[in-house]
Image (cartoon, helix red, strand yellow):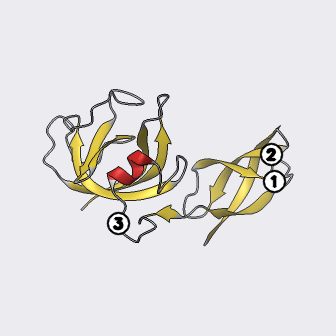
């Protein structure tokens, strides 16, 4: 379990729950997160919150694969995942349009293809991918049609 020390920037009450806009301090300092917490907290105050775990395996203990993200049974939108695959840039086998922008890129493994939105890995060319193996840590999201994609937080070339 990872605990985050959160400084409250702004709170907004909706439907009996307070949605907090906060800025984490520590390892992820400076990254804004939207957290939900059922307690009142004034702007400028600090609260402790449990960081959601990073999903790396299925319930059966197998390494997480693209197929697991696409079917959204092992992982739900909003969860943070870590997934290994090949960088396909803009030349992959995903059959749908990019979910966020034309600069979204593709990650493939033996089970399928998923779009990733976010920074293109340093040193990789999305127009000329070479099946580089990468590790992507990011949040699972879904477009307006319900199609899964990843919002990259970090990408490491293996």
Q: CA distance from mark 3 to mark 2?
A: 35 Å
Mark 3 or 2: in front is: 3
What secondary structure is marked by label 1? loop
Quarter where residue 115 is shown: top left
Q: Is residue 81 left or right of residue 2?
A: left
Mark 1 or 3: in front is: 3
Residue at image x 35%, y 57%? 83
> At which x and y percent is residue 156?
31, 58
Pointer 2 residue? 18
Up-down relation of residue 4 to residue 98 (above or below): below
Q: Is residue 29 left or right of residue 138?
A: right
> At which x and y percent is residue 82?
40, 59
What secondary structure is marked by label 2? strand
3 or 2: tag closer to the N-terminus: 2
> At which x and y percent is residue 66?
33, 51
1 or 2: tag closer to the N-terminus: 2
Q: Name the quadrant of the N terminus.
A: bottom right
Pointer 3 residue? 63
Q: How packed is label 3: few (under 14 Cα within 10 Å), some, or many (20 or more)?
A: some
Q: Is residue 68 left or right of residue 89?
A: right
1 or 3: tag closer to the N-terminus: 1
Residue at image x 46%, y 67%? 59
Question: Residue 70 versus residue 105: which sits nearer the camera?
Answer: 70
The reply to whether dot 1 and dot 2 touch (C-beta < 8 Å) is yes
Pointer 1 residue? 38
């Amino acid at each position: 379990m990872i605990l985050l020390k959160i400084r409250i920037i702004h709170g907004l009450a909706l439907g009996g729950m307070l949605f907090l806009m906060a800025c984490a301090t520590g390892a992820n300092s400076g990254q804004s997160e939207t957290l939900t917490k059922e307690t009142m907290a004034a702007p400028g105050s600090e609260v402790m919150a449990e960081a959601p775990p990073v999903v790396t395996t299925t319930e059966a203990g197998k390494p997480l694969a693209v197929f697991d993200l696409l079917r959204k049974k092992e992982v739900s939108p909003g969860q943070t995942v870590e997934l290994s695959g090949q960088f396909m840039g803009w030349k992959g086998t995903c059959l749908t349009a990019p979910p966020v922008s034309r600069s979204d890129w593709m990650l493939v493994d033996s089970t399928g293809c998923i779009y990733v939105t976010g920074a293109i890995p340093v040193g990789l060319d999305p127009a000329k991918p070479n099946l580089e193996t990468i590790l992507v840590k990011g949040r699972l999201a879904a477009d307006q049609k319900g199609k899964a994609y990843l919002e990259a937080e970090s990408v490491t070339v293996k």
